[in-house]
């Protein structure tokens, strides 16, 4: 088709129209690219002063730390730490305080290690964040495993897939430590999986089918990913961003990273799971609304427990819950030792 312009003004208008369309298409393309990139590429955080202090003098926090690099089935290397109770602890305030609380409430603490707790951080988090949780579990003699998820911290990997690959990583990490602990002549024991936010959602997705997890503790998890992405777009980009652009950005991100974001639904795994489940959520959570844990709890089966912290937002649930919450978590694990595989 050939256009002939008899008027300079018409030609100018048509040229201007093409420029506007081209710029609009470019803007849409940029938005899709940026949205896709933000979805699958979390910002890597650096260690903070508190992390360095703990890593330099772990015994002062009641811990002995042993780092290990673990290679995943696809070749990606994840950095991990095995944390156990220090035989010569310093102040160890968190560990000592919780141990005294458990004894005061007549909780029978095992003489030997009852099992292993694997701790998963949230999106944009670090394994070192989870060492504060490990300090509480060693009060009950558990050994703990923390690791940087792929594309997080010091681990390798380019993309976050919200559970698609992370489930496989969790299983590979468990198998690595099962072998290592067996080689030392120790009993791996009960396996408890504790996760925050994204880490919690990964654990929940791992409960479907044959699972080696004996107890699952999920803090601020999402029931399905899509509404969380939509909520993030509203907060970080613009609430009026057209739905079709959102859809393309989400799909594009999933295509690059090799997964379908619309199929990430932890609630589907919870519905068919019989693993003891402990859910925790902050009532004021603006990132993942508390209704997600309500739905997950309703979909789950016994044995289960749900604790809602009225004063907590998304990232301060454990801090707001304090020692009372940690006691409930540890007791839940100890109470279900008979469910160990």
Image: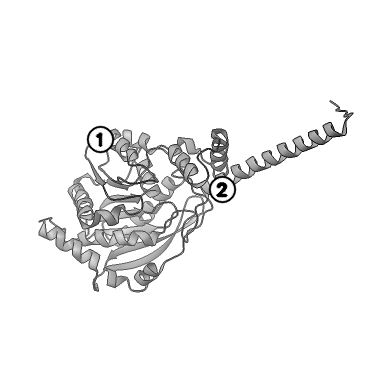
Q: Choose the circle earlier in sequence order: 2 or 1.
A: 2
Marks 2/1 in contact by CB < 8 Å: the verdict is no
- Quarter of the image holding residue 308? top left
Residue at horizontal 24 percent and vertical 69 percent from the top: 92
- Quarter of the image holding residue 212? top left
| Residue 32 x/y as whole percent | 59, 42
Nearer the observer: mark 2 or 1; the answer is 2
- Viewport quadrant of the N terminus: top right
| Residue 106 x/y as whole percent | 10, 56
Residue at horizontal 24 percent and vertical 61 percent from the top: 138
Residue under circle 2?
37
Residue at horizontal 11 percent and vertical 56 percent from the top: 105
Q: Is residue 192 left or right of residue 171?
A: left
Please tell me which residue lies in front, 273 or 256: 256
| Residue 303 x/y as whole percent | 21, 39
Count of numbered labels shown in the rendering? 2
Residue 301 image label: 1
SS for dot 2: helix
Q: Is residue 117 visible?
A: yes
Question: Which of the colour schemes (rainbow, by chain, secondary structure, one colour) is used?
Answer: one colour
Q: In this rendering, is residue 157 above or below 302?
A: below
Residue 15 image label: none
SS for dot 1: loop
């Amino acid at each position: 088709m050939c256009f002939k312009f008899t008027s300079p003004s018409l030609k100018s208008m048509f040229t201007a129209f093409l420029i506007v369309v081209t710029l609009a298409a470019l803007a849409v393309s940029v938005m899709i690219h940026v949205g896709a990139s933000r979805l699958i590429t979390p910002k890597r955080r650096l260690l903070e002063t508190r992390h360095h202090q703990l890593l330099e003098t772990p015994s002062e926090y009641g811990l002995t730390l042993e780092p290990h690099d673990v290679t995943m089935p696809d070749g990606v290397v994840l950095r991990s730490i095995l944390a156990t109770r220090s035989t010569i602890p310093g102040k160890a305030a968190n560990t000592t305080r919780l141990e005294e609380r458990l004894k005061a409430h007549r909780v029978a603490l095992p003489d030997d290690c009852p099992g292993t707790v694997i701790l998963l951080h949230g999106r944009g988090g670090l394994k070192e964040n989870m060492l504060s949780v490990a300090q509480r579990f060693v009060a009950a003699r558990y050994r703990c495993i923390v690791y940087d998820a792929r594309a997080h911290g010091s681990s390798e990997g380019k993309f976050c897939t919200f559970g698609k690959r992370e489930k496989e990583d969790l299983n590979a990490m468990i198998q690595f430590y099962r072998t290592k602990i067996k080689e030392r002549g120790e009993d791996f024991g009960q396996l408890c999986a504790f996760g925050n936010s994204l880490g919690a959602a990964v654990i929940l997705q791992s409960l479907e089918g044959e699972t080696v997890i004996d107890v699952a503790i999920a803090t601020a998890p999402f029931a399905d990913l899509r509404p969380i992405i939509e909520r993030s777009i509203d907060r970080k980009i613009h609430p009026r961003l057209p739905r079709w652009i959102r859809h393309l950005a989400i799909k594009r991100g999933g295509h690059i990273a090799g997964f379908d974001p619309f199929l990430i639904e932890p609630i589907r795994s919870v519905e068919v799971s019989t693993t003891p489940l402990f859910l925790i959520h902050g009532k004021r959570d603006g990132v993942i609304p508390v209704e997600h844990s309500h739905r997950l709890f309703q979909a789950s089966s016994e044995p289960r427990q749900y604790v809602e912290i009225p004063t907590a937002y998304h990232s301060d649930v454990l801090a707001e819950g304090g020692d009372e919450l940690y006691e409930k978590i540890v007791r839940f694990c100890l109470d279900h030792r008979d469910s160990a595989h």
